[in-house]
Amino acid sequence: MLESIRARFAEFEIHALWVAKPANIRYLTGFTSPSDAKLLVTESAAVLYTDARYTVQAQNECRVPHVIARWEEVFAHVKPLVSGKNVGFEADAVMYSDFHELLQGLAVSLRPVTDIVEPLRAIKTPIEIQKMRHAAQIADVALEQILPLIVPGASERDIALELEFQMRRLGADGAAFEIIVASGERGAMPHGTASHKLIQDGELVTIDWGAFLDGYHSDCTRTVAVGQVSDHLLEIYRTVLEAHRLGMAAVKPDAKCFDIDAISRDFIHGAGYGEFFGHSLGHGVGLNVHEAPRLSFRASGDERLEVGNVVTVEPGIYVPGIGGVRIEDMVLVTLGGCESLTHAPKQIL
Ligand code: ZN
Ligand code: ZN
């Protein structure tokens, strides 16, 4: 992995890279508390810097040499390794105050870089796939266990709590993100985290959840009906389900990310709900819940899927005052198309 990073140094006109993004640090070193670490990669060396709380952990986990130091001491160690060199830093992760500190501490030429580690992370290794498959499986089983609790009178929060509890009991390290449970009119908020609202008969309930396991995330959404829902909500559900099916069928190696988004989006538009689908069709998942590649109308024309990408397909329709539907699966791009890693049933009306 480090060699692949170094191979890109020339392209960015750098001789070394200062890595601050936790997911990138974890990916390149194996260290599982990357929020409390920094990583320097030079042409001939790599050093992880962390503090004394992690002496044993760094020893056990880190695949590159590490230095235990107080933050004030770190630059004294880094300086001789980078003197006279162009040092790249992650422009989309470093705050101005950190940049200032780096500039003072290293006294070298700093070069902003973006997307130097992320493209590597977008292609999952077999071990990463195994972890994500396991996370997705835990999430599937947990949903199945809490489905009977989704009844009139139950609160959104209680459902979210139970879902997280079940995932942890099944071996997850936690929820992949704050669980969304959005019922009735709240379903019109794509990111409506669980509230104290009580679920009522005749409502749709959108649940967006995932498991966090060994650094990796799963991501899935289902919308379930409580009792008899209106024909209007049924029509919205069927529209999203078909948009989802079309999107899934379009996921294959070499497919353009923009085009896959367009296939689902055009269908929703044709059904008259275009203005109610505001977000992208999907995103990459891995060490972060949202990472490359993105299936989006914002993707550039040359962004294409590759074997080993893990992406979500998640069309939705959100009608203010009425409610909403989203259906999301997390899929692995394979030679023949894609394989869904999430398997919770979709026909739950
Ligand atoms: Zn999701
Ligand atoms: Zn998602």
Image (tube, rainbow, N blue to C red):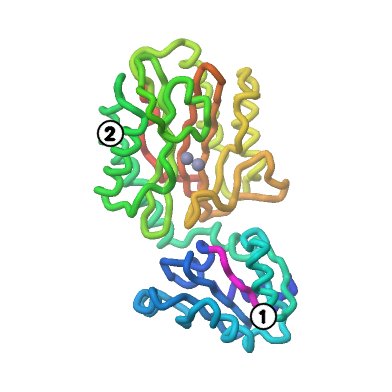
Q: Nearer the viewer, mark 1 or mark 2?
A: 1
How many marks can you see? Answer: 2
**Nearest the eye: 242 or 295:** 295
Residue drawn at the location 63% of the way across and 89% of the way down: 80
Residue drawn at the location 66% of the way across and 84% of the way down: 82
- Apparent side of residue 135 relative to residue 81 in the rendered image (left or right): left
Whether residue 333 is visible to the viewer of this picture, yes or no, is no
Q: Amino acid at mark 2?
A: Ile
Residue 152 location, x and y as percent? 31, 19
Q: Amino acid at mark 1?
A: Leu
From this viewpoint, which residue is outermost toward the bottom?
80
Q: Quadrant of the C terminus?
A: top left
Q: Which numbered dot is residue 106?
A: 1
Quick check: is the Cβ at mark 2 less than 8 Å away from ligand 1? no
Name the residue beneath numbered marker 2. Answer: 146
Crowd rating for badge 1 (residues with CA inside 10 Å; few <14, some 14–19, many 20+):
many
**Nearest the eye: 120 or 180:** 180
Instruction: Write down the region rendered in magenta.
Output: 16-21
- Apparent side of residue 4 relative to residue 70 in the rendered image (left or right): right
Magenta stretch: dominant SS?
Answer: strand
Residue drawn at the location 44% of the way across and 20% of the way down: 184
Check if residue 278 falls in the magenta segment. no
Check if residue 18 falls in the magenta segment. yes
